[in-house]
Image (cartoon, grey):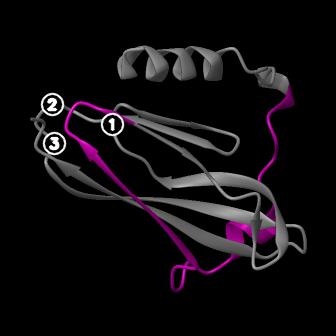
Amino acid sequence: MHPGFLVAFLLWLALLLPMRPPDAAPVPSPALQAAPIGALDTTLVDTVSAGEIVIRTLPTTLEGRSVIEYRPVRLPARGWWRDRSFFWRTPDTAEGNYRFEFRARMEDGSARTVMIRVYVATAD
């Protein structure tokens, strides 16, 4: 099986996940909006070749506490997020280090920052 087929299938599957109707969009919590950015709490690291797709599932728990929701702080062009899933189609000439951030609202009302660091290598 060609690796590109698997990636395409996973993306197709992710698009089939139930979507929230626009009128049911969550209202941001005051705790999420007011939480200071401060130091980063969690960092996830990936390495891919230029032109590949990054697929990352954000953690369901941080520090032993459940994450209620994620909100993007910094996302790339050609990237998107849904619930706990992050996808990014890297450009063919995107060699370098990239950083993306999310705010996680915890069950106790506090917020944490989750950073995704991606190193994009030259495609062979």
Q: Is residue 44 left or right of residue 77?
A: right
User: Which residue is at 48% across, 20% downward?
Assistant: 6
Provide residue 29's location: percent of width, then percent of height.
Answer: 81, 60
Q: What secondary structure is marked by label 3?
A: loop
Q: CA distance from mark 2 to mark 1?
A: 13 Å
Q: Are marks 2 and 1 in contact (CB under 8 Å)?
A: no
Q: Residue furthest bottom?
A: 39
Whether residues under marks 2 and 3 lie with C-beta atoms below 8 angstroms apart, the answer is yes
Residue 52 in which image quadrant = top left
Identify residue for label 2: 92
Residue 51: image quadrant is top left
> Can you say which quadrant of the picture contains the C terminus?
top left
Q: Amino acid at mark 1?
A: Ala
The location of residue 32, given as percent across then percent down, is 73, 66
Residue topped by disc 1: 77
Q: Amino acid at mark 2?
A: Asp
Q: Quadrant of the N terminus?
A: top left
> What amino acid is labelled 3 in the image?
Ala
Foreground tag (3 vs 1): 3
The CA span between labels 2 and 3 is 6 Å
Q: Is residue 114 above or below residue 16?
A: below
- The circle on residue 94 is 3
**Secondary structure of the residue carrying numbered label 1:** loop
Q: Is residue 33 magenta?
A: yes
Residue 85 bears which disc, if any?
none
Query: How far, Cα to Cα, is label 3 from label 1?
Result: 11 Å
How crowded pointer 3 is (Cα within 10 Å; few <14, some 14-19, many 20+) is rated as some
Which residue is painted at 66% across and 74% down in the image? 112
Magenta stretch encompasses residue 99: no
Which residues fall within the magenta stretch?
24-53
Which residue is located at x 61 percent, y 81 percent? 36
